[in-house]
Amino acid sequence: MDNVSVSRTEPIGDGSGSLYVLEKQSKLPFEIKRIYYITDVASCSVIRGNHAHKQLRQLLFCVGGSCEITLDNGVDRMTVILDDPGKILYIRPCLWREISKFSKNATLIVLASDEYNEQDYIRDYEEFKEYVRK
Ligand code: TYD
């Protein structure tokens, strides 16, 4: 699917823990203007997201626990399981996303290319399909 890629960053580990690095150029494809994180999701039946962005680009990874990201371009759907701190999902604009199956203690980190702007959201699925069709 266009506008989605998954990459790996290998930990630097020496027995005292695992250290993960995302560095400019190879691993950070845009300037980060905002970081947010999701924790304490009460139940594995919770579904977050349910929106698309017109311009925003995001990198997502779970530093603890796991969750599933389902992406939809208006035609096809795919699911990426984030269950490893070294697995980095890059989402470019115009993809509907649903975030589900949060494990207990899941911590999802999101690096975003812009500040929060509700005008950049499409929160209605039919509106999203119309937007991508045009
Ligand atoms: P939303 O992006 O819909 O969360 P999710 O996709 O994880 O379900 O945001 C949830 C609420 O938080 C919504 O009212 C907007 C607000 N919000 C901010 O104020 N700033 C932010 O940076 C983000 C991501 C959300």
Image (tube, grey):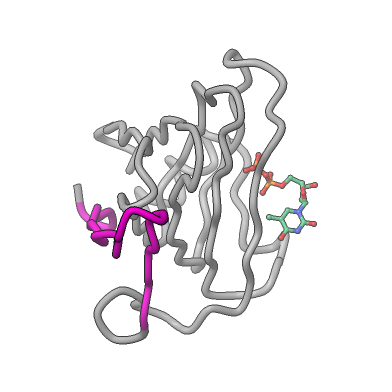
Residue at 64% x, 52% y: name it: 37
Number of marks: 0
Residue at 52% x, 74% y: name it: 113
Locate residue 130 relative to residue 40 in the image: left or right.
left
Position of residue 97 relative to residue 92, above or below, is above
Residue at 54% x, 41% y: name it: 127
Locate residue 9 relative to residue 97 in the image: left or right.
left
Percent x, y of residue 99: 51, 33
Locate residue 75 relative to residue 20 in the image: left or right.
left
Q: In the displayed image of the protein, which residue is found farthest to the front?
A: 15
Q: Observer-nearest residue: 84 or 61? A: 84
Q: Using the rendered view, name the quadrant where residue 80 is placed.
A: top left
Which residues fall within the magenta stretch?
A: 2-23
Magenta stretch encompasses residue 125: no
Q: Using the rendered view, name the quadrant where residue 57 is placed.
A: bottom left
Locate residue 41 relative to residue 90 in the image: left or right.
right
Q: Observer-nearest residue: 102 or 76? A: 102
Percent x, y of residue 134: 37, 55
Percent x, y of residue 16: 41, 56
Residue at 62% x, 54% y: name it: 121
Q: Observer-nearest residue: 119 or 81? A: 81
Position of residue 28 relative to residue 88, above or below, is below
Position of residue 81 relative to residue 88, above or below, is above
Q: In the displayed image of the protein, which residue is found farthest to the left?
A: 1
